[in-house]
Amino acid sequence: MDAILIKGGRALNGEVRISGAKNAALPMLTATLLVAGKFRFSNVPDLKDIESILQLLATIGAEVDRKGEEVTVDTRGVDNFEAPYELVRRMRASVLVLGPLLARLKRARVSLPGGCAIGARPINMHLDGFERLGAKITLEHGYVEAAAETLTGEEIFFDVPTVTGTENLMMAAVFAKGTTVLRNAAREPEVTALADMLNRMGAQISGAGTPNITVSGVDTLVPVSAEIIPDRIEAGTYMVAAALTQGNIRITGAEPDHLKPVISKLREAGAGVELAPDAITVTGSRPVSSVDIKTLPFPGFPTDMQAQFMVLMSIANGLSVITETIFENRFIHVLELQRMGADIQISGNHAMVKGAERLSGAPVMASDLRASASLVLAGLVAEGTTRISRVYHLDRGYESIEQKFGQLGANIKRISETASS
């Protein structure tokens, strides 16, 4: 198992290119299961989660070929409706095969999902939606089985916005008879990217990016080529890195419209942010001003940026309050940041962060994907050496993170867990 070793204290400067968004690529790749044919994707990130979904597609019967950032998926041989535990346990997003398999093969059997330990993320809203469309749902032996000879359009109301639930139901409804309306739907850019791809395949979807999505059922779809949108969370992470280290980083390939709340809070904290159509330049300065944040579904401040922003607040002047409203266990990185000298107190879903003069390097352990990113950021600004264990979490969502930070001037390297620091 690998670890990452960082010697902090360097200002980061230069240019970094943002990779394709994992959370857009995963549902778009599973959408290939809706119809027989050959799909081509560009700007696909090289990540463990992408590798896992491609393996799952191959197990179901698709032919998958990858050459760099280009991926081809041929679904003409898909005839298997089961997604086994051995693959699904690696990644919660594997549940996204339920909708397209049910729509195309009339049946799907998918192991209950795994994923990061950041809270209970039940799929009950997915299953309730499938039942509303007319599917029969059974749960036994750790598997969800859905079956329906015909799906019928219906109005579905989500108790809370759910990204994967919205995507799963949107895919299932494309062949449903009549019209399906998803109320309180997720508005994330990744949902809109999936809807755009489905529409180019021949689906009739309107309202993506709003709380109400309408899907009018069609009889046929065709395969298409698609480009994966940029990863807004990766972009946000490098933006915070510039502010943290008093650096100057030009982030290319990013989409500023996807990052408005992060841009706003960075400016409020005192960082300079300049925008171009496909690039964002962030310049850090001292002192950092303390600001409060509250995570919310898009277009609010993203929960996936909460841990990274907490590191910035740990060296800010004054007290900031960070409120987490999405996941109940998303403060599990706090204990590790405290080991590095951060002054953070937790009360329910609030974190009170009192800015410290400095952070100091320490051996720490990652607990999930975004917690891993926050520990890297803390190591970049800390005095001395930080050793981060269990960095396999990073490989699920950040492409070549040590190389990218290294190109910006960081003293960072990946080592064997048994190597001495």
Image (spheres, rainbow, N blue to C red):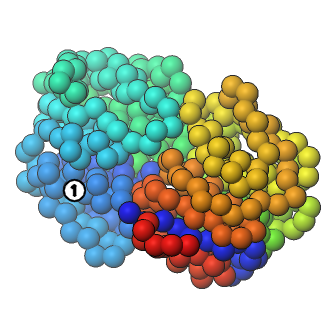
| Residue 70 in sight in this render | yes
* Total marks placed: 1
Residue at 26 percent across and 29 percent down: it is 176
- Quarter the N terminus occupies: bottom left
In the image, what residue type sits under mark 1? Gln
Residue 334 vs 186, above or below: the answer is below
Q: Nearer the viewer, residue 175 or 117?
A: 117
Return the x and y of residue 146 as percentages of the image width and height: 20, 25
| Left or right: residue 219 compared with residue 347 | left
Return the x and y of residue 44 as percentages of the image width and height: 38, 65
| Residue 228 in sight in this render | no
Q: Nearer the viewer, residue 190 or 175?
A: 190
| Quarter location, residue 299 | top right
Q: Nearer the viewer, residue 132 or 1?
A: 1
Bin the neighbour count of mark 1 within 10 Å (Cα to Cα): few under 14, some 14-19, many 20 and up.
some
| Quarter location, residue 93 | top left
Return the x and y of residue 371 as percentages of the image width and height: 57, 50
Residue 205 vs 71, above or below: the answer is above
Residue at 13 percent across and 38 percent down: it is 81
Residue at 17 percent across and 24 percent down: it is 141
Return the x and y of residue 66 as percentages of the image width and height: 26, 70
Q: Secondary structure at mark 1?
A: helix
| Left or right: residue 293 compared with residue 124 | right
- Quarter the C terminus occupies: bottom right
Residue at 38 percent across and 67 percent down: it is 46
Read off the residue under disc 1: 55
| Left or right: residue 162 compared with residue 78 | right
| Left or right: residue 193 compared with residue 129 | right
